[in-house]
Amino acid sequence: MKKLSARRRHPLAAVVVLLLALAATGGLYTAFAPASKAKADDTAQSLTIEEGKKLYEVGCASCHGTGGQGTTDGPSLVGVGAAAVDFQVGTGRMPAQQPGAQVPRKRVVYNQAQIDQLAAYIASLGAGPAVPTKNQYSPEGADVAKGGELFRTNCAQCHNFTGKGGALTHGKYAPELTGTSPKHIYEAMQTGPQNMPSFPDTTMTEKNKKDIIAYLNAVNGDETVNPGGLELGGLGPVSEGLFAWIFGLGALIAVAVWVAARTAKAKKS
């Protein structure tokens, strides 16, 4: 009897063996760590959304409604996605100073952390385009020539062929793209802000968007050389033709009048 008692296992022996087995196979990490990490991520996201909601209630709800459903002063934000918020708030267009045909770009009110919180809250109201990653909008390795072709086909009618902007109807305008960050250009193509149509990946692929961004960087970059001399703002043939008509033809008329006056005076003498 004493021999059998000595061989009897300790009550915790089975637990120790199980823990050792889990540790040896990585199961201990799988059993505990991911659940804790997922819970922490969910908590952090919930806090971000909660902070974004507070910012929204102070700076946005008066126009867009308490739940983002929209009012007569502002459109619904349900389903616009985080990318739309990052673009509109990150370029200073929102919060808008006053309603109008066009909301201009101005000084940014919120810092990037607050913009991320607002974007998280709006994204929680309904699925929409997410904020792009650097790999999505970086122009590295893009086809500049293809980007120029795409830009002239889809964008130049409003933004001019080098992105200098242009007038539209009823007080609207296509803004100048010089100095706009690649991320914001990508988000504008994704979301179609204000008068601009949207170009989702089903219409224009991610690579095509990168090509367009690379083209704009090439024609408006700091190292870009313009061999054509005075560009007249780069606004295209209309401005150039108007310049030639007013100043060129005006100069010719002035010379003709001067020659005629000199000829008449010579004949009298």
Image: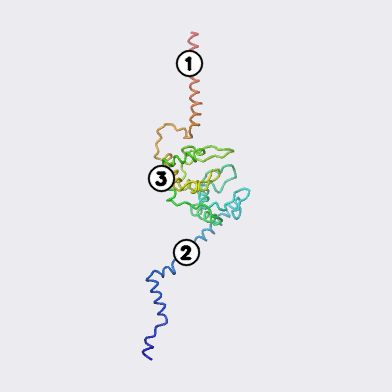
**In which image quadrant can residue 169 be found?**
top right
**In which image quadrant can residue 18 be found?**
bottom left
At x 48% / y 25%, what residue is drawn? 248
> From the viewer's perspective, is the residue at label 2 or at label 1 nearer?
2
Q: Looking at numbered disc 2 in the image, what kind of residue is underneath it?
A: Ala
Residue 244 screen position, x and y as percent: 48, 27
> From the viewer's perspective, is the residue at label 3 or at label 1 nearer?
3
Q: Which mark is residue 259?
A: 1
Residue at the top extreme, as displayed = 269
- Of callouts 3 and 1, which one flags the residue occurring earlier in the amino acid sequence? 3
Q: Looking at numbered disc 3 in the image, what kind of residue is underneath it?
A: Ala
Residue 172 screen position, x and y as percent: 56, 40
Task: Quickly name the residue at label 3.
Answer: 142
The crowd level at tag 1 (other Cα within 10 Å; few <14, some 14-19, many 20+) is few
Task: Quickly name the residue at label 2.
Answer: 38
> From the viewer's perspective, is the residue at label 2 or at label 3 nearer?
3
The crowd level at tag 3 (other Cα within 10 Å; few <14, some 14-19, many 20+) is some
- Is residue 175 positioned above or below 6 on the image? above
Residue 46 screen position, x and y as percent: 52, 61
